[in-house]
Image (cartoon, rainbow, N blue to C red):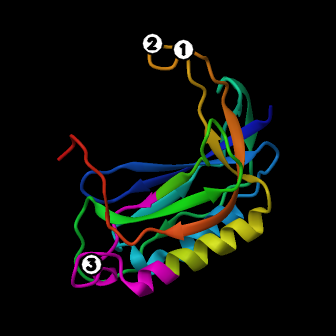
């Protein structure tokens, strides 16, 4: 069992928004600078209307049950604004997969963070993320992992017993070991359009 601080990045300034990105960190990891730097390294991919705010406080959860056991507080960091140029599709962007090396429930848990929207110039003629966008995300994510050490986690949620899954499963926290930018575009669907 480990306690996890839930850190949130809030996205605003685009059709279909607002949005959030959620990160799970070993409790006590309260510097927002590495998270700020992750997004700061990708600003040229985001339209200038996109604003990113980093919550300076949030819940601490217990990984087995997901229950809130406290709160964390950190020194705030500034809001970031996209610097990308050109057109963009409001619900289309990119995704990074957070990889782990630990097997839980017969598989390696993976996390995902979606960067939506991104400007059209980071897509190739087939509609996939181009090599520049892929490199930008891989570099920023790699630096983020290096600065976080073993504190960045994928939270594998608990599961109650059911007909399909007769055995209850506790949640767990698994250390992120690497990241991969996915080449296919990510599309976020919403009812707000």
The quarter of the picture where residue 101 lies is: bottom right
User: As drawn, is 78 to the left or to the right of 131?
Assistant: right
Kindly identify the residue that appears in the image at 22 percent across and 80 percent down.
126
179 is within the stretch colored magenta: no
The quarter of the picture where residue 140 lies is: bottom right
Tell me: residue 99, above or below residue 27: below
Residue at numbered disc 2:
163
Label of residue 120 in the image: 3
Tell me: residue 49, above or below residue 25: below
Q: Do the residues labelled 2 and 3 touch (CB within 8 Å)?
A: no
Q: How far, Cα to Cα, is label 2 from label 3?
A: 45 Å
Residue at numbered disc 1:
166
Q: Do the residues labelled 2 and 1 touch (CB within 8 Å)?
A: yes
Q: Do the residues labelled 3 and 1 touch (CB within 8 Å)?
A: no
- Provide residue 159's location: percent of width, then percent of height: 56, 23
121 is within the stretch colored magenta: yes
- Provide residue 10's location: percent of width, then percent of height: 48, 52
């Amino acid at each position: 069992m480990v306690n996890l601080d839930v850190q949130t990045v809030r996205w605003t300034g685009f059709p279909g928004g607002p949005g959030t990105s959620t990160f799970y960190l070993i409790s006590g990891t309260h510097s927002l600078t590495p998270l700020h730097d992750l997004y700061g390294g990708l600003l040229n991919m985001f339209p200038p209307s996109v604003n990113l705010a980093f919550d300076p406080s949030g819940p601490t959860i217990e990984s087995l049950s997901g229950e809130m056991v406290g709160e964390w507080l950190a020194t705030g960091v500034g809001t970031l604004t996209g610097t990308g140029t050109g057109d963009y599709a409001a619900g289309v962007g990119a995704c990074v997969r957070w990889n782990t090396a630990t097997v839980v429930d017969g598989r390696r848990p993976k996390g995902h963070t979606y960067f939506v929207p991104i400007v059209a110039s980071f897509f190739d003629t087939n509609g996939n993320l181009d090599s520049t966008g892929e490199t930008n995300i891989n570099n920023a994510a790699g630096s983020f992992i290096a600065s976080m050490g073993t504190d960045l986690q994928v939270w594998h949620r608990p599961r109650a017993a059911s007909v399909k899954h007769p055995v209850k499963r506790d949640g767990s926290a698994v250390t992120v070991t690497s990241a991969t930018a996915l080449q296919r575009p990510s599309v976020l669907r919403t009812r707000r359009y």
